[in-house]
Structure formats: structure tokens, C-alpha cells
Image (tube, grey):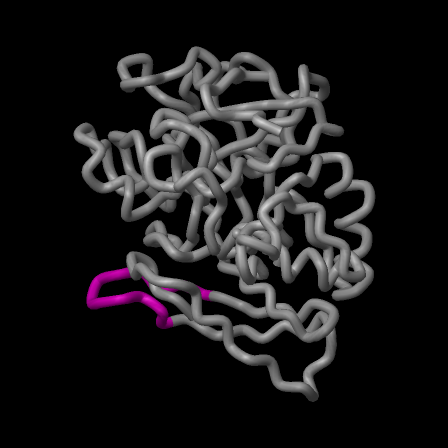
Amino acid sequence: MKTFSSLLLLSAVSAGLSGCPVIPLPNPNEGEGEVIVEGEGEGEGEGESAILTETILLPGSVPLKMVFIPAGKFTMGSPETEVARDSDEGPQHTVTLSKGFWIGQYEFTQIQWKAVMSGANPSYFQGGAYGNTDNRPVEQVSWDVINRLFLPKINTATQNTFRLPTEAEWEYACRAGELDPQTRFYWGDDSNLTNIPQYAWYESNSNGQSHAIGSKRANAFGLYDMSGGVWEWVQDFYQASYSMGAVTNPGGPVLGAGRVLRGGAWTTTEAYCRSASRNYYTPTYQDYTFGFRVVRNP
């Protein structure tokens, strides 16, 4: 595991828009697990790529919005010259993802978790003095609980095959089609840190707590909170360096020191909100900075 100064003390919108997510009210006649494809054409202006989204109804008709990520190729990891780089972000290597996939537009929320898990809510930041926290990310969830209990339940309820993203899928979705040369964040290098408050909840602006999903600006794929918010579990085992050479559809090492988390959190400095930043922890550990988002294959 890595150590952070504030960590371990005890969630159809166009890319680039700020403000809380607009979640459409479901039709009461629609069944659980139904997929509603909103279609293409969510690009914000001329020349921008369209964003294809779908809404899947969870138990109780709670909507789960997904974004389609097209197949592609990118450079994973960070160059040795990147400011605040950690050694486990290399060596840089070319990754090809030969098939597109659907990923949660937002971090999985407390109301969505309660819909799947029969009302249970493990989150530290819930109700009471925090008010209505339904749209905050669910946290205090371990990799083990997500895979052993949550995923079977959501897949049974919706007749889908949800899973955690691979680490390569997560970074590709975070970078959002970024072309070389890479930048530190998905909105640019931001060397003076003037733009990060528009995109991420992190140590300097979070006021010591989580916040509602979608209240910062999205990346070019229309995904929110890929930086800051809560650390997001991914499927892969952690190892302290990547393999050399180009790879296609990597699933990570067969064994490792723990499971990987990506994206930084409301407790971390800007360095851990970088697109290449990595964290890891034992898969049974839960923390009020640990959350996730789901992926499903087409």
C-alpha cells in the first residue's frame, strides 16, 4: 500500500459541462435491468465526438447511466519526466483495447448500492449531519465485497454481466482518447493547478468529506470524477512496475501485493489525481475513500 498524508483516517450529460448530473425519472412500466440507449449526438459542439450513453434500471427503477468507450490504443503509464511521478507508473507501454466497453458515467452511488444490496449502506458519509447523501459515491466497500457479494447480485437483478474495469480500461477511459504527448491530467498538464478545482474533489477543496457525483466537469468521454472523489477499485493485482512492450487487452499480473485503486480521492493531493497515479491495498480492506464504478461488455 502507499501512504498518503490524509488517507486512511478511520459518487444524457455532455463532456465538459459542470453541475450536478441530470438523472431522468424512469418510466414505472419499465422493468428492472431494462437497457435504454439514449443514442449518439451528445457532443457539445461542432467537431466534438458524440457520446453514446445507456441507462440500466436497477431494482426499484433506480437508474444507472453508462457511457460507451470505443476500442482504441493509448500509451499507459507516465514518462520519467512527469512532475510528482511514482516509479510504479512505468515503464510506459502501448496498450491496445480491441473491443469497446460500457463504463459507469459516475462513481457508483449510495442510492444505487442500496437498490442492489436490499437497503444496506456501508458508507461513512451518509444521512444525519450530511443530509441527503443518495448521490454521493458509496464508500467503505472492499474489492472482495464488490466481487463476492455485489456483482453477483447486480448481475442477477439486471441479467447483465457487470464487473470492475481492468486497470488498462480504467486509464484509457480516464485519458479519454488523449493523443501523445500525454498530459498529467485528462484536462492538461495544469502546471499551476489553476484548473483542477473545476474537475476534481481533492484535499484542497473537499472540506474533508465526499461530495455528490457529477458536480465537477467531465472528461472528453463524458465521464465524471475520474480524478478525485473516491479511489476506484479495478480488477487487477498490483505489481510495482508494468511489463515491458506493447500489449493487447491486458488483464494485469496473475499475482500481486494487493488490488489496484485508481484516480485519487477527496483526501489526496493533486499528485494522486494524475491519470497515471496508482494505489493498491489488500482486497478485504475498506475505507471511506474507497469506491468504484462498473463496466460491462457490449
Query: Which quadrant of the view contains residue 148?
Result: top right
Nearer the observer, 115 or 242: 115
Q: Residue at x 60, y 37 (%)?
A: 288
Q: Where is residue 257? Give x, y as percent.
A: 67, 15
Most frequent secondary structure within the magenta stretch: loop
Nearer the observer, 260 or 203: 203
Query: Which quadrant of the view contains residue 27?
Result: bottom right
Nearer the observer, 39 or 234: 234
Quadrant of the frame with the C terminus:
bottom right
Q: Which residues are magenta?
A: 41-52
In magenta segment, residue 47: yes
Q: Where is residue 190? Give x, y as percent.
A: 21, 34
Q: Residue at x 39, y 66 (%)?
A: 13
Q: Where is residue 168? Give x, y as percent.
A: 52, 34
Residue furthest out toward the bottom: 29
Above or below: residue 258 compared with residue 166:
above
Quadrant of the frame with the N terminus:
top right
Query: Which quadrant of the view contains residue 248?
Result: top right
Lateral position of residue 250 relative to residue 60, left or right: left
Q: Where is residue 28? Give x, y as percent.
A: 67, 86
